Amino acid sequence: GTLFKTKRGEKSIKPKSVDMLAKTLRPLPDSWYGLKDVEERFRKRYLDLILNEEAKETFILRSNLVKQIREFLWEESFMEVETPMLQPIPGGALARPFKTRHNALKQDFYLRIAPELYLKRLLVGGMNKIYEIGRVFRNEGMDREHNPEFTMLELYWAYQDYEGLIKFTEKMLKPFVKEKWQRISYRDAFKKYGKIDLDKVKNKEEIDDVFKRKVRPHLKKPTIVYDLPKAISPLSKSKASEPELTERFQFILEGTEIVNGFSELNDPIDQRERMEYQEKLFRKGNEEASRLDKDFIEALEYGMPPAAGLGMGIDRLVALITKRESLKETILFPTLKNKE
């Protein structure tokens, strides 16, 4: 076309020909009113991104955050790997899995609840600094902090312990969390905020639930909670000085856990005993208990080096940085119930 000015003096183009790039059969919602229904924004994220600049900026920030983490880990000599999403035995976390069927193999599989046990097999194989960023799936309740599928960073470092990994994690999070991280032991947090003596709790399996309800909401400032009980830490190495506690830590911000890490249990005998205990809980009806994975135990029997590892929820971290109320704001297409 050719450039010209209208009678009002506006610059315009006089086209010689017009090609249709796309058919727009529906008009966009009014840009002033936009999409007022919050759930409709999540169902029709494409419209939300057109009309809501803030939503677009959130996902640009998320992309940049993941890029920064990858660059940091590359500079620290970590190698990115991929592990199976379809697993014959669910493991690596205490959570209820999604079950599916492989028709060709005539075998049940589970969408992974964590990549942990496969990453540890790679430690056995001599890969000393590894990580994976990917989706995990948990068939649990939904709220502002939980979505059935979410993105997690999982990282393992051979010949490192939880104290070294805590310092490393603080360094990794420094670009995103400027405040200094305060520290408190799990036992002291129970006493201070829950008014409960941890040693007097009889049902050890309920400890984590009590912590989430009565203690964690008080931890608004950046807080590192450490030395968690063995009863709720089936994959963590026990403390030599207090065997009922483990070398485990959590990074908590605004009452939300964003990082969980520990010195890894690499004793195959101890690991088998803990998995057998969890298997008993599963058979008694606890669908979130971890299962006995004999193949993983066999891998440990070849010798896994001492190591420390962590898991970090990417969606939660983005939500906290951007001050979003729900993970639905930081996942492009969150899980929603059908309208019908």
Image (spheres, helix red, strand yellow):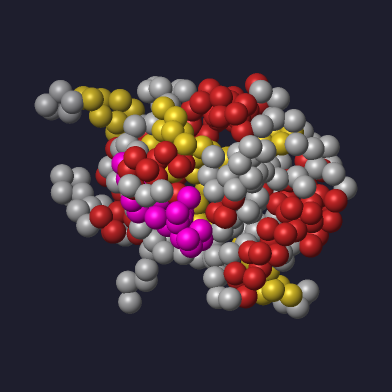
The answer, for residue 213, to whether it is visible in the render is yes
Magenta residues (range): 199-218
Please provide percent x and percent y for residue 26: 29, 59
Magenta highlight: main SS: helix
- Image quadrant holding the C terminus, namely bottom left
Q: Is residue 65 left or right of residue 97?
A: left
The residue depicted at 65 percent of the width and 21 percent of the height is 75
Q: Quadrant of residue 53?
A: top left
* Residue at figure coordinates x 27%, y 44% from the top left: 51
| Picture quarter with the N terminus | top left
Residue 280 part of the magenta segment: no
Q: Is residue 148 visible in this depiction of the protein? A: no
Furthest toward the right, the residue is: 302
321 w.r.t. 82: above or below: above
Query: In this rendering, would 156 be left or right of 50?
Result: right
Judging depth in this view, the residue of 285 and 258 nearest the camera is 285
Q: Quadrant of residue 38?
A: bottom left
Q: Nearer the viewer, residue 188 or 81?
A: 188
Q: Position of residue 249 (x, y in %)?
A: 53, 38
Which residue is rendered at x = 48% and y = 50% of the image? 199
- Residue 47's spot in the image, x, y percent? 32, 51
